[in-house]
Amino acid sequence: MPNNFLTKEGYQKLQDELDYLRTAKRQEVANRLHEAMEGGELIENAEYEAAKNEQAFVEGRIQELEMLLATAKIIDENGRKKSDTVQIGSKVTIKEGNFDSETFIIVGVAEANPRDGKISNESPIGKAILNRKVGESVKVETPGGTYNVKILKIS
């Protein structure tokens, strides 16, 4: 299993999801199953099948979250010593060619969300810029091709 890095915020978000699934969502699915079983024949009952599928999804997600949280390594953004190289938890500003600069926070896979400015340490950009310094130009290899980015700022 790859290293499972989470910020405190990301850990709490996953913990909240797990709590919701264990309580409210499990009960909701159980009620749907109960109602579907009262409807008579289960062989051709589409609502029963849908509820069973949802129950399987919920239980699978609960197991996944339990494993993620049990093996998580918390990134302490406040206690992290100032580094002149890109690390997990670093806020990094990069620039590709003539495009506008972009700022990302390097996080673990479970917390990655590029739309929110969080990229995984295992993504092509994340891998390429880890342990690099301000001013370095780095080659990023992606399935869609190779391009270069320059690291402008690390905080």
Image (cartoon, rainbow, N blue to C red):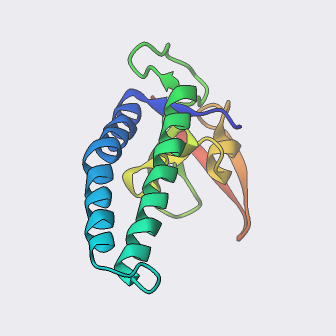
Quadrant of the rendering where the C terminus is positioned: top left
Give me the residue at 70% from left, 71% from top: 144
* 46 lies above or below 115: below
Q: With 88 as the anchor, is 127 left or right in this view?
A: right
Q: Where is residue 64 drawn, in percent x and y? A: 53, 44
Give me the residue at 52% from left, 40% from top: 152
Q: Nearer the viewer, residue 97 or 79?
A: 79
* 9 lies above or below 45: above
Is residue 154 at least partly visible in the picture?
Answer: no
Q: Nearer the viewer, residue 66 or 82?
A: 66
Is residue 54 at least partly visible in the picture?
Answer: yes
Q: Where is residue 95 drawn, in percent x and y? A: 54, 52
How many discs appear? 0
Q: Quadrant of residue 50?
A: bottom left
Q: Nearer the viewer, residue 59 or 88?
A: 59
Q: Residue furthest bottom?
A: 44
Give me the residue at 46% from left, 55% from top: 114
Q: Where is residue 67 drawn, in percent x and y? A: 56, 35
Q: Quadrant of residue 11?
A: top left
Give me the residue at 71% from left, 37% from top: 1
Q: With 120 as the anchor, is 28 left or right in this view?
A: left
Q: Nearer the viewer, residue 143 or 7?
A: 7
Q: Where is residue 39 drawn, in percent x and y? A: 28, 78
